Amino acid sequence: MSNTQRFEGKVILITGAASGLGLATAQRLATEGAKLALVDLTPEGLAAAVRSLPAGSETVTVAADVAQLSQVQAYVAQTLQRFGRIDGFFNNAGIEGRQNLTEDFGAEEFHRVISVNLDGVFFGMAEVLKVMRRQGHGAIVNCASVGGIRGVGHQSGYAASKHGVVGLTRNSAVEYGQFGIQINAIAPGAIMTPMVEASLRQMGGEDWESVGKTFVEPNPMRRFGKPEEVAALTAFLLSGEAQFINGTVIEIDGGQSNKY
Ligand code: NAD
């Protein structure tokens, strides 16, 4: 639990805010005084997210599919209509896709994952950067993955999209630093969220919890990460305390990606 108020008066936009890392980040930032614009696929999911925030939190919710440019433009417009600016953006919504060998992955599934994870992140950055450039300040955290810096296997669409997110982050950071805007990516390892539970169920069915135990054995910390730990990192990067950190990809994986 946070005892700081780094986000007092700041407006933060979060996509994929109804679950997992997006939700944990919304909760963390709300406790630190942020005004929040929350984006996810359904009004119901967003309403539940808002109910989980501290009483009195200032929010606007927008049901939108991040893979559709017009809906991205709409969530940016509605954020501006409600709050007038965007100080920070957690560009987080993403899907894993069905796990499969590359030859069996399938063109349709590949494009589905790319359109959410890569088009969605690009559309979001492009629209939010117009606003931040006008303002002369802003911070963006794109959600990549260790699958965006290492090979994981059985995840062609996910790997391609997350490597793409890393590339977009580095490219735009070089362009926008001069306008007072910092752009970074985070690369979480396995963090226990509904996405990871679904993935373990793909591997182990009803036995997914014991598959999970085996899965984390190679991790130096012998456990899954917690959504609150990712929220704390994202909060730091968006807080204004990290302003000279730009164009980096920060691993948050218990050290696993350093292992031979
Ligand atoms: P999650 O499934 O719990 O939450 C993702 C949220 O994004 C959901 O609420 C979902 O409805 C929303 N979403 C999905 N597609 C969307 C779309 N087209 N438009 C708008 N919203 C959409 O997953 P999570 O684990 O919290 O994942 C969040 C991000 O973190 C993803 O980009 C994921 O790839 C990344 N990530 C997660 C892990 C992990 O271990 N959990 C590891 C590395 C990276």
Image (cartoon, grey):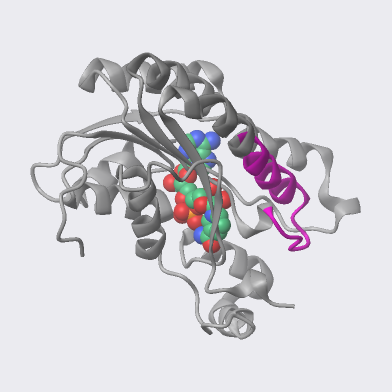
168 vs 77: above or below: below
Q: Tell me, yes or no, if residue 19 can be seen here.
A: no
**Which residue lies at the image location 37% right of the left edge and 30% below the top edge?**
138
Image side of residue 242 versus residue 2, left or right: right
Rendered location of residue 248, percent (x, y): 55, 47
58 vs 128: above or below: below
Image side of residue 55 versus residue 208, left or right: left
**Which residue lies at the image location 63% right of the left edge and 79% below the top edge?**
215
152 in magenta: yes
84 vs 138: above or below: above
Rendered location of residue 80, percent (x, y): 29, 18
Residue 259 falls in image quadrant: bottom right
Rendered location of residue 86, percent (x, y): 32, 26
158 in magenta: yes
161 vs 27: above or below: above
**Which residue lies at the image location 69% right of the left edge and 37% below the top edge?**
114
Q: Which of 30 and 116 is in front in this view?
A: 30
Quadrant location, the N terminus: bottom left
**Which residue lies at the image location 9% right of the left edge and 47% below the top edge?**
55
Q: How many labels does the image show?
A: 0
Q: Which residue lies furthest to the left in this view?
A: 56
Q: Tell me, yes or no, if residue 80 can be seen here.
A: yes
Image side of residue 148 versus residue 129, left or right: right
Image side of residue 17 versus residue 56, left or right: right
Residue 35 falls in image quadrant: top left
- For the stretch drawn in magenta, the main secondary structure is helix
Which residues are the magenta region? 149-168
Quadrant location, the C terminus: bottom right
Q: Residue furthest right?
A: 103
Rendered location of residue 98, percent (x, y): 70, 54
